[in-house]
Image (tube, helix red, strand yellow):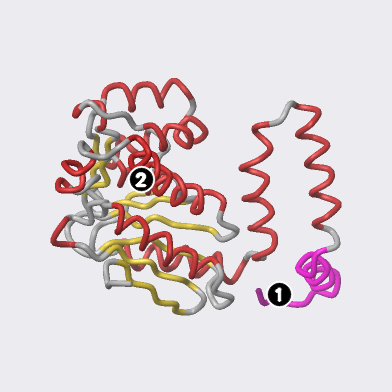
């Protein structure tokens, strides 16, 4: 393990910091693998309830490392498939995490970096942040992020963003519903920390995990299947420790401490 990815926990908020500022936090096989390892540690950390992904330097993540792109041209199909699966596994881990994952985007989030921000539950950016699925402009395709982007913004917007490959600012990203809010660079850290702290204090970890599971699964089902699944999850939720605790506190007018 190197120091390309940093991890710390404060007040039950886990901070995953991309730490390749000299490379604009560009992705390589090793970097993605290390992000996966650190994210798995955060996912399994009982002291971490909410995860924030952020970055050191002037860029959140500027896509793929140039040396890494050159290397791909000499890979066999099997090597390229293993590399693709590496990124797919990272996006899948984040999307299916039982914990809320927040992207704190400073500067560019391009290509794979834009994908990383896309798969998070919340995304906050600064006015100077830029976004773009730029793969088609270098003869590549935004294959993995496409699966998640269609779910997030719908096919019409996904077609516009993926087929044009255009880079756009934070205001357009918010209009596309890719990000939740824009904050000044000097206040984004404080704002994101406040949002995460509120989630820590006001929400049940078990409930968050179940809601995220349902968000991932329900849209793949027919209406009747989805409703049956929802009823099953509803019934299951009633027997969880958090639900028992929450209802008891509500009925007894006690202050909840999550």
- Write down the quadrant of residue 248 in the picture: bottom right
Report the residue at 83% width, 68% height from top: 244
- Write down the quadrant of residue 201 in the picture: bottom right
Depth check: give the residue in front, 75 or 47: 75
Q: Earlier in the sequence, mark 2 or mark 1?
A: 2
- Residue 253 highlighted magenta (yes or no): yes
Q: Is residue 55 above or below residue 86?
A: below
Please tell me how crowded label 2 is: few (under 14), some (14-19), or many (20+) other residues with Cα within 10 Å.
some
- Residue 217 highlighted magenta (yes or no): no
Residue 128 in view of the camera: no
Which quarter of the rendered picture does the N terminus lie within?
Answer: bottom left
Mark 2 or 1: in front is 2
Report the residue at 56% width, 61% height from top: 99
Residue assigned mark 1 = 256
Please tell me how crowded label 1 is: few (under 14), some (14-19), or many (20+) other residues with Cα within 10 Å.
some
Depth check: give the residue in front, 169 or 156: 156
Disc 2 from disc 1: Cα separation: 45 Å
Residue numbers of the magenta segment:
240-258
* Left or right of residue 241: residue 170: left
Residue assigned mark 2 = 83
Q: Position of residue 39 (x, y in %)?
A: 45, 63
| 2 and 1 marks in contact (CB < 8 Å) | no
* Left or right of residue 23: residue 2: right
């Amino acid at each position: 393990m190197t120091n390309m990815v940093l991890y710390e926990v404060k007040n039950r908020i886990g901070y995953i910091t991309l730490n390749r500022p000299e490379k604009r936090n560009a992705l390589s096989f090793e970097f993605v693998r290390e992000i996966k390892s650190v994210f798995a540690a955060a996912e399994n950390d009982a002291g971490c309830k909410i995860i924030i992904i952020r970055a050191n330097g002037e860029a959140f993540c500027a896509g793929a490392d140039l040396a890494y792109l050159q290397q791909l041209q000499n890979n066999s199909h099997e090597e390229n498939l293993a590399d693709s699966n590496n990124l797919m596994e990272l996006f899948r881990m984040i999307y299916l995490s039982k914990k809320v994952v927040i992207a704190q985007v400073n500067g560019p989030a391009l290509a794979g970096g834009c994908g990383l921000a896309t798969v998070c539950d919340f995304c906050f950016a600064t006015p100077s942040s830029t976004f773009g699925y730029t793969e088609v402009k270098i003869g590549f395709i935004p294959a993995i992020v496409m699966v998640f982007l269609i779910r997030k913004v719908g096919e019409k917007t996904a077609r516009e963003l993926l087929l044009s490959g255009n880079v756009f600012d934070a205001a357009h990203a918010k209009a596309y519903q890719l990000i939740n809010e824009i904050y000044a660079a000097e206040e984004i850290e404080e704002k994101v920390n406040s949002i995460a702290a509120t989630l820590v204090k006001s929400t049940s970890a078990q409930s968050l995990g179940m809601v995220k599971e349902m968000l991932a699964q329900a849209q793949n089902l027919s209406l009747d299947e989805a409703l049956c699944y929802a009823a099953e999850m509803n019934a299951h939720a009633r027997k969880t420790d958090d639900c028992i605790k929450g209802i008891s506190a509500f009925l007894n007018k006690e202050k909840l401490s999550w």
